[in-house]
Image (cartoon, rainbow, N blue to C red):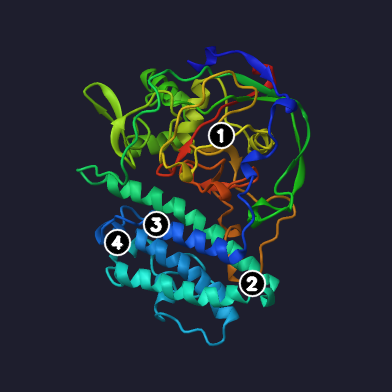
């Protein structure tokens, strides 16, 4: 059990690389950036059938062709309609079909019924993307005359599309998991190692005043602003995420049968949905197997546990004699994290084990799995919702959700940064979500 894992280390800035997860690739102009992001989205559907791209496995997920269309709808609605008086819509009804939650834009097709849209077909959706890209390139070729507010909207649209790239993989995995054949999305890679998890160590951080939020350099979503100060007491953060092997010990110790470990609402969810392990885990011939984007495979003990809810993360932390970090604690540690990260560009498409060796700073804070924090998703002090429909992007969801940090193996590397705030309801499990433990200094 993790409560027996000791070896407290102190945080040493001299041994860290500042903000390395926010390092960006060499600068590229907006037009090139646009093409790269758009091509990456389309490439995710390569090799899939029209049926693969049309089905919806649950109300919270969306068909891949809907993601392909909605990300085009964003540029059409918020950029082209504003910037080009002569713009010709590909189809007038797409404004309704592919609106997600922007009430200010107008009518929306019900989210739970996106899988019922058999038409337009995949070929039409791809032609729609080409149509929008053609018009967008006309704008981008005249970039020097483009007003700053439209440049900002284009950049927002590209980061929005990168979010949907990860959602496409998240939703596709859930869809394929419902198929009894358990088909693979990509060729599975061999297990990284049969070695046990690296020793979990505790890395101490001093008390003090810290800045939380985006510093204003480069792009940020509005929920990362404004930058403000927070005071943190001394705390310790685990050197790596909770592994599958760690989590198996929790299961074997009756973690899913002990109500004393669970929040009341979490226990109700466990009972109602019959949770007994992370999502996609199955017991076969006495050993745990897991469905991945590469098909079924044995659970890798040393890899970070994935697809757990906030309720499961909180229950595990109680069992381990620890707690979940606040988002302020997580961000303070992540600003100084060493990173050799497992993002979507790596092609693994699953969490990978931590590197062997002693940890001088927390490992795997970026990539692999999103990490639940104990912080409710709420506005920062001084937050203001942007005017107009685009202001609906984040602000109206700041209730009944928890913050996750750090990105996953499905996140584009250029999309993540220390201040990035993801958020989901406490019972959500189909996202690539995992656990990192924290402790108060007196327990470290």
Residue at 64% x, 45% y is: 23
Q: Which quadrant of the view contains residue 156?
A: bottom right
Mark 1–mark 4 CB contact (< 8 Å): no
- Please report whichever mark, 2 or 4, sits nearer to the chain's N-terminal start: 4
Residue beneath disc 1: 340
Q: CA distance from mark 2 to mark 4?
A: 32 Å
Label 2 packing within 10 angstroms: few (<14), some (14-19), many (20+): some
- Please report whichever mark, 3 or 4, sits nearer to the chain's N-terminal start: 3
Mark 2–mark 3 CB contact (< 8 Å): no
Total count of labels: 4
Q: Position of residue 25 (x, y in %)?
A: 60, 49
Image depth: mark 3 or mark 4 in front: 3
User: Where's the C terminus, which quadrant?
Assistant: top right
Q: Which mark is residue 54?
A: 4
Label 3 packing within 10 angstroms: few (<14), some (14-19), many (20+): few
Q: Position of residue 166 (x, y in %)?
A: 45, 50
Residue beneath disc 2: 150
Residue at 57% x, 29% y is: 363
Q: In the figure, is residue 229 to the left or right of 181?
A: right
- Local SS, label 2: helix
């Amino acid at each position: 059990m993790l409560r027996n894992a000791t070896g407290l280390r102190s945080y040493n800035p001299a041994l860290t690389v500042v903000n390395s997860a926010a390092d960006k690739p060499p600068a590229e102009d907006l037009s090139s950036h646009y093409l790269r992001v758009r091509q990456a989205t389309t490439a995710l559907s390569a090799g899939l059938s029209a049926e693969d791209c049309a089905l919806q496995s649950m109300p919270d997920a969306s068909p891949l062709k809907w993601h392909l269309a909605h990300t085009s709808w964003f540029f059409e609605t918020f950029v082209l309609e504003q910037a080009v008086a002569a713009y010709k819509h590909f189809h007038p009804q797409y404004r309704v079909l592919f609106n997600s939650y922007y009430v200010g834009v107008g009518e929306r097709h019900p989210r739970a019924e996106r899988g019922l849209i058999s038409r337009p077909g995949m070929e039409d959706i791809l032609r729609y993307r080409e149509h929008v890209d053609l018009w967008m390139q006309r704008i981008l070729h005249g970039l020097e005359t483009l007003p700053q507010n439209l440049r900002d909207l284009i950049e927002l649209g590209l980061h929005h599309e990168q979010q949907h790239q990860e959602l496409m993989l998240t939703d596709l995995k859930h869809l394929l998991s419902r198929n009894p054949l358990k088909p693979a999305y990509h060729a599975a890679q061999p297990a990284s190692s049969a070695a046990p998890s690296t020793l979990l160590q505790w890395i101490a951080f001093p008390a003090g005043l810290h800045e939380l939020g985006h510093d204003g350099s480069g792009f940020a979503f509005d929920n990362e602003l404004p930058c403000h100060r927070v005071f943190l007491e001394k705390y310790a953060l685990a050197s790596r995420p909770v592994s599958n092997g760690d989590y198996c010990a929790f299961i074997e110790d009756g973690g899913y049968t002990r109500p004393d470990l669970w929040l009341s609402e979490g226990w109700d969810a466990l009972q109602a949905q019959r949770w007994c392990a992370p999502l996609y885990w199955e017991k076969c011939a006495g050993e745990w197997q897991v469905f991945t984007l590469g098909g079924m495979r044995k659970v890798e003990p040393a890899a970070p546990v994935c697809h757990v809810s906030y309720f499961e993360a909180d229950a595990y932390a109680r069992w381990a004699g620890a707690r979940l970090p606040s988002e302020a604690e997580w961000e303070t540690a992540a600003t100084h994290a060493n990173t050799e990260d497992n993002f979507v560009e790596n092609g693994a498409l699953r969490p990978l084990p931590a590197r062997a060796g002693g940890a001088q700073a927390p490992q795997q804070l970026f990539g692999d799995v999103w990490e639940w924090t104990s912080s409710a998703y709420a506005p920062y002090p001084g937050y203001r919702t942007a005017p107009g429909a685009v202001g609906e992007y984040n602000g109206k969801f700041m209730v009944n959700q928890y913050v996750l940090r750090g990105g996953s193996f499905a996140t584009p590397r250029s999309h993540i940064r220390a201040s990035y705030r993801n958020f989901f309801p406490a019972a959500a499990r189909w996202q690539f979500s995992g656990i990192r433990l924290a402790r108060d200094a007196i327990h470290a």
